[in-house]
Amino acid sequence: MTTGAKSDLKHRFEAAFHLPFGHQWESERARPDWVDLEPLVDALAGPLYSIVETGGCAYVYPRDDGYFTGVDGPDTLRERLRHWHDKLVEAIDRFVPTSSAEVADLASMRHFAADIWAFTEEACDIEHARWAAAKG
């Protein structure tokens, strides 16, 4: 990965994963609800950050823990990340707005989740290419 490509990828990672935590929420409820989602966001961010920094995340495959048991290649990694993302979206959908400010915040949360998944897809494609190149 070229330096420019890595820099651009890092910028997109930061936009997907860091921007939401600096977001100015419209309501009192939204920020604490988003913060409660941090464990799911962090689970997604871990392998993706490794891809940004090193061009891959081979460290996940030999792990036999609660996060990566059964993840033995890029396809199962994508499935695991999809599972976590689905849980994120389900949690967001439990935020039931009671005001126009909360409606706006729910839209922001959904936008953040969509950006996270778009970046996840891109990073998984990079990991798949790294995997294929390593296999020869």
Image (spheres, rainbow, N blue to C red):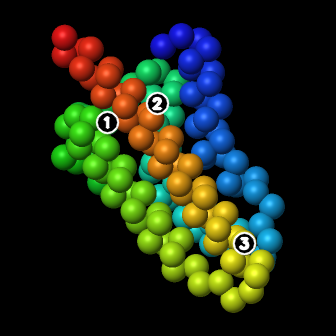
Which one is earlier in the sequence, the residue at label 1 or at label 2? Answer: 2
Asked if labels 2 and 1 touch by Cβ distance under 8 angstroms, the answer is: yes
Q: Nearer the viewer, mark 1 or mark 3?
A: 3
Structural distance between the alpha carbons of marks 1 and 2: 10 Å
In this rendering, is residue 18 above or below 86?
above
| Disc 3 residue type (three-letter) | Ala
Mark seen at residue 50:
2
| Disc 2 residue type (three-letter) | Ser
Residue 107 drawn at (x, y percent)? 64, 68
Disc 2 element: helix
| Disc 1 residue type (three-letter) | Val
Which one is earlier in the sequence, the residue at label 3 or at label 2? Answer: 2
Residue at the image position 59 percent from the left and 12 percent from the top: 3
**Mark 3 lies on residue:** 104
Residue at the image position 39 percent from the left and 57 percent from the top: 84
In this rendering, is residue 67 above or below 34?
above
Q: Is residue 67 left or right of residue 98?
A: left
Classed neighbour count for the residue bearing mark 2: other residues with Cα under 10 Å, few (<14), some (14–19), many (≥20): some
Asked if labels 3 and 1 touch by Cβ distance under 8 angstroms, the answer is: no
Residue at the image position 39 percent from the left and 27 percent from the top: 126
**Mark 1 lies on residue:** 60
Residue 62 drawn at (x, y percent)? 23, 34
Mark seen at residue 92:
none
Q: Is residue 45 left or right of residue 101?
A: left
Q: Quadrant of residue 78?
A: top left
Asked if labels 2 and 3 touch by Cβ distance under 8 angstroms, the answer is: no
